Amino acid sequence: MARFTRKKKDPDPPDTNDLVTELKLKKVMPAVPLRDIVVFPGMVVPLLIGRQKTINAVEEAQSQTKNLLVLVFQTHPETEDPAIKELIPIGTLARIIQVVRQPEGQLKLLVESLLRVRLDKAHPDLRYFAVSVEAAETGRRGNTEEEALQRLLVDSLENYNQLNPVLPREILGNLLQINDPERLSDTLSGYLPLKKEDKARVLQELELVPRLKMLLQILNKEIEVLQVQRQIQGEVIKKIEKNQREYILQEQMKTIQQELGKEAEGSEVKAFQEKIEASGMPEPVRKKALEELERFSKMMSLSPEATVVRNYLDWMVSLPWKKTTSDTLDIRKAQEVLDEDHYGLEKPKERILEYLAVRKRSQSLKGPILCLVGPPGSGKTSLARSVARAMGRQFIRVSLGGVRDEAEIRGHRRTYIGSLPGRVIQSMRKVGVRNPVFLLDEVDKLGMDFRGDPASALLEVLDPEQNCAFNDHYLEVDFDLSQVFFITTANVEATIPPPLLDRMEIITLPGYTETEKLQIARRYLVPREMTANGLKDGEFEFSDEAIREIIRSYTREAGVRSLQRQIASICRKIVKEKELRDRKLSERVKVSRRRVGHYLGVPSYWNEESDRASRVGVVTGLAWTEYGGDVLFTEVSTMKGRGQLIITGRLGEVMKESCRIALSLVRAHDEELGIDPEIYRRQDIHIHVPSGAVPKDGPSAGVTIASALASCFSGRAVAGDIAMTGEITLRGKVMPIGGLRAKLLAASRNQIRRVIIPKDNQRDLAEIPRAELAGLQIIPVENISEIFKIIFNN
């Protein structure tokens, strides 16, 4: 319940003249900044106070300033604690009449505004909102001009209230009886529904004549707007009446024509009836469609509801309820198609062929739901197209990146204007068959907000036990998705919602090795870009060394998307050269390694050979990102100080903890490493991971940080051709990590010869093709001591 605060009763209300005299000298007063209201002298208004500093100001006024405080309008209502420049310079001094404390901690005030005051400055250091003010004397002369303006204002008020009767008769009568022009201007400004900015301008005008002119101008402008508004409204009403009259006449004419037999009865209804019978709908769906058709036949054709039902019937009869395509069950031919379109990717190809082999023997097999996880450019979307081609099915793709509304999947209910089915049903209508290959792209980038969770809506779509009866909100009937071959793609498995992940079969597409990229470029990218840029066979050739140079010096990716762009750029430049120099089309252009720089300019990337030279305090680590593996250097330096640990490089909390664990671990092995213990007290330690603009996190850099610390403290360098990855514990155990294949590919891409990995990850090597490990010496370790022996040569 609200609590009433009784304030001490003043013996007499404060006299305005006494207040003016008292405020001739600047005085600090508690203040209430107002967001939505401008208060004029003479007004009694209720206020709801919620800001803590403002509540404190009310309490200060009750205890120290005889219930007097300043009301001032703030120009930026979103500001919680406004500065003096965010307040208008003129406010009003007000008296608190009543205070009601609300259960939520807010205060409800009833205040009486007394007179204008001028603000000087704010006092933000006080616990309550306070300003220094002085009396703002208004200029009033009592001449005939003031009386003339008062009469004009009264006339305008009567005209305004006739056009917009916002003032009750009693209040209007009281206003018209006010003889004091200053009181009239303030009372009118407070009562009329004017813009807050206009009211603030009137409040700040101290001279009476300019104030009356300003208010008269504002009032006349409002009258002009109301007159135009009334004129437009009248025209609209006339137009509506005309349309209604025409509609009645048309309906009468239609009835007369029907009586005379000049109009075919129910032609549209009959057309829908035929389409429903021919669509092959299941019986419950057919029953629903016929019910809607019956409703439609009884409606007036031009009514809004008839349009809604017509659109609904259009959707119902255009969906592929029974139409399918025949699968190509020739396994050898399907394998040829997959190999023709993609190099490598053996695991997903094998899974597709398994499905076709079982499908050949069991026609009732439900479509699998595969999730292709891999870095951008690794061939996920194009592989889905190849699957459709290999199976002889139609292909449809829906991008889910950034989708936040559940209705995007399930559709909107028909109660909403402009409602439509969700993307799934829209795509099924577009593809025209009930068994396509359906690609849901970027499923890891689904969002969620107040409109629902689209990932939860996808559960019904991707669950083989439920998708035989998928219910779209718009259709309100079940649609069978069990014959659809769903394929989803994602860059990162970790961001896929767990319930959704549980319904999908994960197939990982790792990044390509340099050899695989070379083959992909020769077999697919170069011929494709030659055709796209108008180059014919025989007039253009890439050497293998040129392609390798592009891969090493102009791209840094796990996929081949950037490689394709660079090849396309070279093709365009060659075509331009041919056209500018009038070279014969038959003249053959061969791009060698040396010519790559001529076409593509300065290399964008380079292998950090100088950084990988043996240097004290620098160790090469391996990292995993959603774009594949990469090399990550860790640098450690010391300087005179008191043993403070400094960590830079935009590291996450987990990686910062790895730095502290690594330091404690090295300190525990200082005797083994020959490190002077005094170094921890006399010098500060700085750990830095380059590429400071890129966020980094994860535990797998633990061994790298520990090795860099040991190298810096002992003064011994670590060989530049050694890279490592692994999590460490405080006891020195090397724990397993993820993304091993991508990290080993990064090591191979950067010409690293030796890679130290956790021994528990040794079993993961069996799933990595031997060709990808060529040239790498993999060294499994169990604890940090083994690493120290390897990097410091015993």
Image: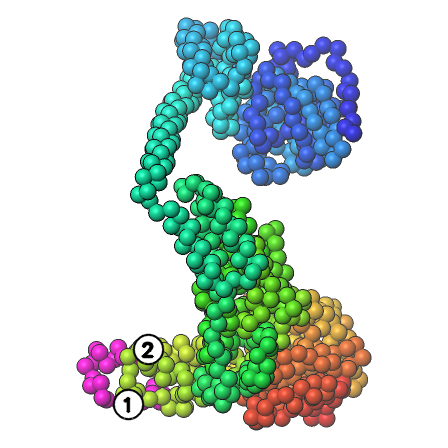
Mark 2, residues whose alpha carbon is within 10 Å: few (<14), some, or many (≥20)?
A: few
Query: Could you tell me which residue is drawn at 63 percent across and 24 percent down?
Result: 70
Q: Which mark is residue 538?
A: 1
- The amino acid type found where label 1 is placed reads Gly
Residue 247 lies left or right of residue 179; in this view the side is: left
- Residue 243 seen by the camera: no
Is residue 580 shown in magenta?
yes
Q: Give the residue number, with chain letter if any, for mark 2.
A: 532
Where is residue 483 shown, x and y percent of the image? 55, 72
Count of number-bearing discs: 2
Quadrant placement of the N terminus: top right
Identify whether 102 is placed above or below 25.
Answer: below
Quadrant placement of the C terminus: bottom right
Identify whether 551 is placed above or below 313.
Answer: below
Query: Could you tell me which residue is drawn at 67 percent across and 67 percent down?
Result: 498
- In the image, the segment drawn in magenta is 573-596
